Amino acid sequence: MIKKIEGLDAVADTLEELWISYNQIERLNGIECCKKLKVLYASNNKIKAWEGVTSLQALSGLEDLLLVGNPLEEKCTADGNWISEISKKFPSLRKLDGKPIIREDAMDDEEGKE
C-alpha cells in the first residue's frame, strides 16, 4: 500500500514504465525525475485533485497514462471533460486509460494536408 512515490533517483535515467496501480497515492510528486518515462499506470489510487498530477508535466516523453479509478478521473468523467482536460495538460500523451487520444488539432492538420 504505497502512499507516496520516492526513491526513484537510482533509476531515473533509465525507467520507461512505472506500474503503481491499486495503492494509496494522492499525488504523483517524486516522479518528475524520471525523464525517460513513457508509460505510467496509476489507476485505482487516491488522486483527487489536479495538483496530484501536475508533476507529470515535467515528463515530456509520457505517452501512455492510466488514471482510471482515481477520484479526479471519476469526477471529470462524470462532468464530461476528462479527456479534453488531460489532453490540454499533457500534449505528448497518445493513450489515456487504455484508449487512443484523438485531438482536434491533429484532425485540423490532416484536413490542411488535403
Image: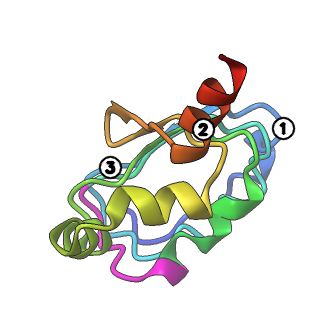
Residue at image mark 2: 108
**Residue type (three-letter) at the residue carrying disc 2:** Asp
Q: Which residue is mark 3?
A: 21
Q: Nearer the viewer, mark 3 or mark 2?
A: 2
What's under tag 1, amino acid-wise?
Asp
Question: Which numbered mark, 2 or 1, is in the foreground of this view?
Answer: 2
Question: Going by the picture, which residue comes out furthest to the right?
Answer: 13
Question: Where 18 falls versus 59 (above or below)?
Answer: above
Looking at the rendered image, the quarter that the C terminus falls into is top right
Whichever of callouts 3 and 2 sits on the residue coming sooner in the sequence is: 3
Q: Which residue is at 24% across, 74% downward? A: 71
The amino acid type of the residue labelled 3 equals Ser
**Residue 64 point in image, percent of width and height:** 50, 36
Q: Who comes first in sequence, dot 3 or dot 1?
A: 1
Main secondary structure found in the magenta portion: loop
Q: Which residues are magenta?
A: 44-51
Mark number, residue 13: 1
Answer with left or right where residue 22 lies relative to residue 2: left
Image coordinates for residue 58, horizontal then vertical, percent: 76, 60
Determine the CA span between mark 3 and mark 2: 35 Å
